[in-house]
Image (spheres, grey):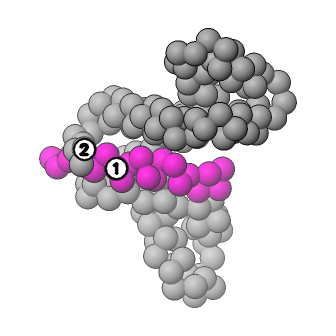
Amino acid sequence: MGFPVKLKEIIKAVEFQSDEIGAYLNKETGEIVTISEEEFDAVEDQDPLENYPEWEQDNIKIAREILDNEENFLNLPTKHDIHEYQIMEGFCLSVKDREVSEELYGAIKGKRAFGRFKEIIERLGMADEWYKYRDEAIKRIAIDWCKSNHIEFEEE
């Protein structure tokens, strides 16, 4: 690729993904696309495009292009690459106030870790700090992904 990809777009697509939706970078155009498992299934099942709404037909065509030309597409980092638990753990350890750090760290142990953590950061008024920390961690992951895949990127 001879042109930079907007880091902001990569981050947005990474955060949009789920178990049912993946994000891909077209190495030829620099376009980032999100495609659902249902759209890939439609290609593999060879369902007629007419069976789908017009907006979904475009995504099915892109899914077909991805499957037919895998070498032209890169999977963006997924939630499995993000490791949000590790990001939470890093945040807990980064808090300067030892008591608060220990309370947060204790909250992420065991079942309902994410829920307890979010309750505590809300109660302590630390939500903005957490989301800023999380956003920076995801940005670092996106930058590392770009560098490891030799993708030129630009920050805005």
**Quick one: label 1, few (<14), some, or many (20+) residues within 10 Å?**
some
Mark 2 and mark 1 in contact? Answer it, CB < 8 Å: yes
Q: Where is residue 34 shown, x and y percent of the image? A: 48, 59
Relative horizontal placement of residue 90, taking residue 38 as reference (left or right): left
Residue at the (58%, 35%) spot, across then down: 126
Residue closer to the observer: 31 or 46: 31
Q: Which residues are magenta?
A: 1-22
Residue at the (34%, 50%) spot, across then down: 8
The amino acid beneath tag 1 is Lys
Mark 2 and mark 1 lie on one chain; the one further toward the N terminus is 1
Please, which residue is most extreme toward the right here?
A: 111
Relative horizontal placement of residue 85, taking residue 96 as reference (left or right): right
Residue closer to the observer: 153 or 66: 153
Q: Is residue 136 magenta?
A: no
Q: Where is residue 123 shown, x and y percent of the image? A: 69, 38
Q: Is residue 8 magenta?
A: yes
Query: Please, what secondary structure does the residue beneath circle 2 have?
Result: loop
The amino acid beneath tag 2 is Glu
Count how many numbered circles sit on residues in the image: 2
Q: Is residue 74 above or below residue 114?
A: below
| Residue 57 visible to the viewer | yes
> Of the numbered discs in the image, which one, if any, rests on residue 8?
1
Q: Where is residue 47 shown, x and y percent of the image? A: 63, 76
**Quick one: label 2, few (<14), some, or many (20+) residues within 10 Å?**
few
Relative horizontal placement of residue 109, taking residue 69 as reference (left or right): right
> Of the numbered discs in the image, which one, if any, rests on residue 155?
2
